Amino acid sequence: MTTPPVADRMRALRPQLWCALAGPVAIVVALAGWLIAGILPKPPAADLSTAELVRFYASDPAAFQAGVTISIFGISGMGVLAGAITVRLLDAEGRSPVLCFTQLIAGTVTWVLLVVPLVIMNVAAFRPERSPELTVLLNDLAWLLFVPPVAPFVVQNVAIALVVLRDRAERPVLPRWVAYANLWVAFLFLPGVLSYFFKSGPFAWQGLFSFWLALSSYAAWAFIMGFALRNALLEEHAAAGGAG
């Protein structure tokens, strides 16, 4: 069997390279949307009064909905990244890729858990004149769907870590440090569960450990996985004779 020309190999590789970058791009676009919406730098706190919360959604509904919509498009890139991760890990697991597909399923669920709360926030802003109690309910539903359900995120990270650690090939699909980074990110997600029980302080949904630590960890994870995938693909291409 003849080796395909360098140009053909790069042409086949290019979609995976672009998909790997979808994660970092997703984070940048999503955070930009949150800034436009006014969710960042100070998300609405769980202990806001009803009047304060209604004022948050009613102050500029058009800007809020535009920013959240941009974030929804941005977050969609995380589904693309999950697909790229799966394709890469399939080479390590071979004929029994149960962890690869576990990662893909968990990544799809996390994508939904990020998008659906944003849609609910848009619903909350859609009719500023509605009953204040309903606005509070929609806001609580959105944030309690967004922050504390960390289990699928943890499952995805652990599945990736296990595949990478079990890869005994001479040239592994991803470096082992990527596995340890995934395990750390999984651990850092865990405080988010506590936002079910706190309305103020570092464990509330807007708090240091539940929101900011999880957000920073997830953003770092997207960049780590995106560029680790890209570097591994380019190194593999170069090793196959495509350095030129």
Image (cartoon, helix red, strand yellow):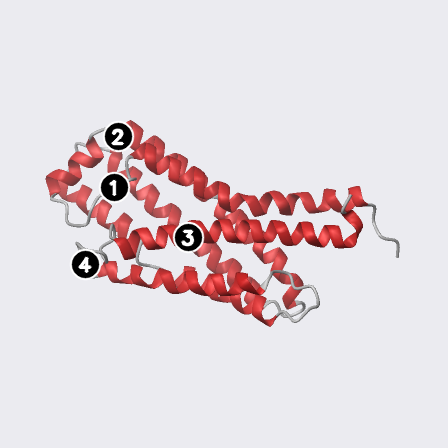
Q: Earlier in the sequence, mark 3 or mark 1?
A: 1
Which amino acid type is marked by label 1?
A: Lys
Q: Residues within 10 Å of mark 1 (few under 14, many from 20)?
A: few
Which amino acid type is marked by label 4?
A: Phe
Question: Which residue does the numbered mark 2 point to in the structure image?
Answer: 61
Q: Earlier in the sequence, mark 2 or mark 3?
A: 2
Q: Position of residue 69 (x, y in %)?
A: 38, 35
Q: Position of residue 106 (x, y in %)?
A: 47, 60
Q: CA distance from mark 2 to mark 1?
A: 17 Å
Dot in front, 2 or 4: 4
Q: Position of residue 15 (x, y in %)?
A: 65, 44
Which amino acid type is marked by label 2?
A: Pro
Q: Residues within 10 Å of mark 3 (few under 14, many from 20)?
A: some
- Relative placement, left or right, of 143 versus 169 is left
Q: CA distance from mark 2 to mark 3?
A: 27 Å
Looking at the image, which residue is at 50% across and 49% down? 223
**Residue 113 appears in the figure:** no
Local secondary structure at mark 1: loop
Residue 162, compared with residue 17, is above or below; it is below
Local secondary structure at mark 2: helix
Which amino acid type is marked by label 3?
A: Tyr
Query: Disc number at residue 218?
Result: 3
Residue 14, compared with residue 170, is above or below; it is above
Determine whether label 2 and label 1 are within 8 Å by CB: no
- Relative placement, left or right, of 170 versus 77 is right
Determine whether label 4 and label 1 are within 8 Å by CB: no
Question: Which residue does the numbered mark 4 point to in the structure image?
Answer: 198
Question: Which residue does the numbered mark 1 point to in the structure image?
Answer: 42
